Image (cartoon, rainbow, N blue to C red):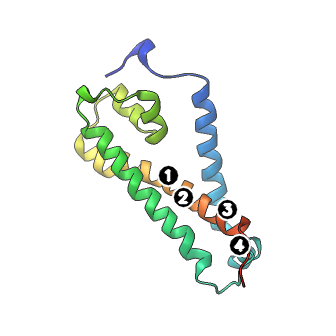
């Protein structure tokens, strides 16, 4: 466990946390919009299946990968010497593992799902951005 000056707490992490917060706020805003507005922004028909299937596939993929990254971070032996700065970017809840040792139950049912939710929402944001900015094919 890292303590004191060894913790990677720098001003750059504030920017990273703010970026993740903006992704969360964007996803909350998109979740409250009517379907017709989302379809208009993505230049799709309101009943087009791809309007929700592509972003949901990215959400699932990002969530599954980040859940596995959280489990790898928990089960990784100390001999692997994982770089804390890289691990905090891949798994923001790695900071919890660095400051205290959470139980296996907490990792499986609280920390890893929270990590999956954070990066799943990033996948959803990227999915909608991809739909909104790509060229429309007829």
Q: Are marks 1 and 2 in contact (CB under 8 Å)?
A: yes
Q: Residues within 10 Å of mark 2 (few under 14, many from 20)?
A: many
Residue 44: x %, y % from top left: 71, 79
Residue 2: x %, y % from top left: 36, 20
Q: Which residue is mark 4?
A: 38
Q: Residues within 10 Å of mark 3 (few under 14, many from 20)?
A: some
Q: Residues within 10 Å of mark 4 (few under 14, many from 20)?
A: some
Q: Earlier in the sequence, mark 2 or mark 3?
A: 2
Give the CA distance from mark 1 to mark 4: 21 Å
Q: Nearer the viewer, mark 4 or mark 3?
A: 3
Label total for image: 4
Dividing the picture into quadrants, the one containing residue 49 is bottom right
Give the CA distance from mark 3 to mark 1: 15 Å
Dividing the picture into quadrants, the one containing residue 84 is top left
What secondary structure is marked by label 2? helix
Give the CA distance from mark 4 to mark 3: 11 Å
Q: Which residue is mark 1?
A: 119
Q: Residue at (47%, 54%) from the top-left corner?
A: 117
Camera-side residue: 18 or 109? 18
Q: Which residue is mark 2?
A: 123
Q: Nearer the viewer, mark 2 or mark 4?
A: 2
Q: Which residue is mark 3?
A: 129
């Amino acid at each position: 466990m890292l303590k004191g000056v060894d913790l990677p707490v720098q001003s750059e992490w504030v920017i990273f946390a703010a970026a993740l917060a903006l992704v969360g706020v964007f996803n909350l805003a998109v979740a409250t919009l009517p379907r017709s507005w989302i379809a208009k922004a993505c230049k799709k028909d309101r009943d087009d299946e791809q309007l929700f299937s592509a972003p949901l596939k990215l959400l699932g993929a990002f969530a599954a990968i980040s859940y596995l990254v959280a489990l790898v971070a928990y089960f990784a032996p100390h001999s692997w010497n994982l770089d804390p700065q890289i691990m905090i970017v891949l798994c923001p809840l790695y900071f919890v593992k660095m400051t205290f040792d959470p139980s296996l139950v907490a990792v499986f049912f609280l920390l890893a799902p929270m990590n999956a939710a954070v990066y799943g929402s990033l996948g959803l944001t990227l999915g909608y951005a991809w739909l909104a900015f790509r060229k429309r094919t007829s």
